[in-house]
Amino acid sequence: MNDQILTSVGKIGITKNEVHPKYKPQIILLPANKNYQFKLHVSNFHNRWGGYRYPILIGNAEIVFQKKQRRINFTVAVCIAAALMACYNIIFFYCRKTDITPLLFSIHCLMILLRALTTGERLGHLFTDDLSWDLLNRIEYFSAFSTEPVLYAFLYRMIPSLFWKRFGKYFNTPLYIMCYLTLVAPNSVYAFFLNYILLYIYLTVVPCWFFLLLLAVIKKEKDAVGLFVTYVVIMIANINDTLVTFGMVDGFYLVPYSQIFLIFSHSIIISKRYSNSLLASEELSIQMKQLVVSSQKIMSSKDDVDAAKSALEILTSKIGKGETIYIYVTNQSIEIAE
């Protein structure tokens, strides 16, 4: 500013070997002056979307600091919530490995955590200088591309669909390809397809699952309403953030808020299902114990008549008031029916 260097991020240069790319959101206190002339020197040999990503905010120091602190606090809240729910559902999966639904949701929470650390305030870039920009950038893109297939796999386990069972792998194939490219290809390659993959998602997979969940709501399937509402919220937030990123609308980012909503709503749904399964298991256990006791009582009878009487007593104790039982007596045995 006014030919005085105030800050620098990474290292600029005229060749790729001279440049050291880096993200570093920061606040700079401006020296008192009547007129300000700002000049930014930017060199970019690594990132397809180079330069500063968000508008530079200039204003009162206290207001700027408060605004940044609120963003950091919310990012930390998203990270903590995602980390806790990831651990919580891993424990669920460990206790019952036959159901991979908690594992899928745990992976989804992990992807949310990684994306929260590498976008927005980019806390992952500020924690340490040992991790390269390239690695953190790959994590950012990989978390964006992989979270969709994991989410759809989770939804399929919650709301089984014959259509998705047959064609889901074909819908997810472009996302799998992008995940692979993010791991092995340079930024110029995997970042090039970002706009195309976003367009593909919004035109195919997003409306597909919207109608699958809507159909589940109409059929009154279990937990369909909660999953549908959460999906609509996530869909609206992602569309809004895409439009804001490309400057099509003037607004603020909603995805962090929708992620918090998704984490807690899906956690409640999973916990509810496990609670219902536990209650059903306890009820079945009680019924099995009663069956064993009843069987022992009948087997210990002196003769067939005594056994029939014991069976009749057990049966009448299970029948509600006002109901009728019928007894059929033959020369060989006594048959009891409700």
Image (cartoon, grey):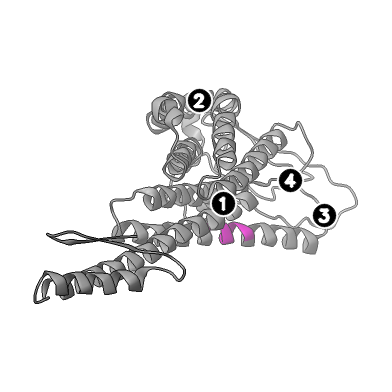
The magenta segment: 74-79
Q: Amino acid at mark 4?
A: Phe
**Does the image show residue 28?**
yes
The crowding category of the residue bearing disc 1, from other C-alpha atoms within 10 Å (few below 14, some 14 to 19, many at least 20), is: some
Q: What residue sits right under mark 1 in the picture?
A: 262
The percent position of residue 159, horizontal first and vertical second, equals 47, 42
Q: Earlier in the sequence, mark 3 or mark 2?
A: 3
Q: Residue at x 60, y 54 (%)?
A: 261
Q: Residue furthest left?
A: 302
Residue beneath label 4, please? 252
**Location of residue 14 with respect to 125 vertically, above or below:** above
Q: Residue at x 15, y 75 (%)?
A: 306
Residue type at mark 3 is Gly
Q: Which mark is residue 142?
A: none
Q: Is residue 294 visible?
A: no
Q: Which residue is mark 2?
A: 188
Decide: marks 4, 1 in contact (CB < 8 A)? no
Crowding around mark 4 (Cα neighbors within 10 Å: few <14, some 14 to 19, many 20+) is few
- Element under disc 2: helix
The residue mark sitting in front, 1 or 3, is 1
Which residue matches tag 3?
59
Asked if labels 2 and 4 touch by Cβ distance under 8 angstroms, the answer is: no
Q: CA distance from mark 1 to mark 2?
A: 32 Å
SS state under label 1: helix
Labels 4 and 1: the sequence-earlier one? 4
Q: CA distance from mark 3 to mark 4?
A: 18 Å
Q: CA distance from mark 4 to mark 2?
A: 28 Å
Type of the residue with mark 2: Ser
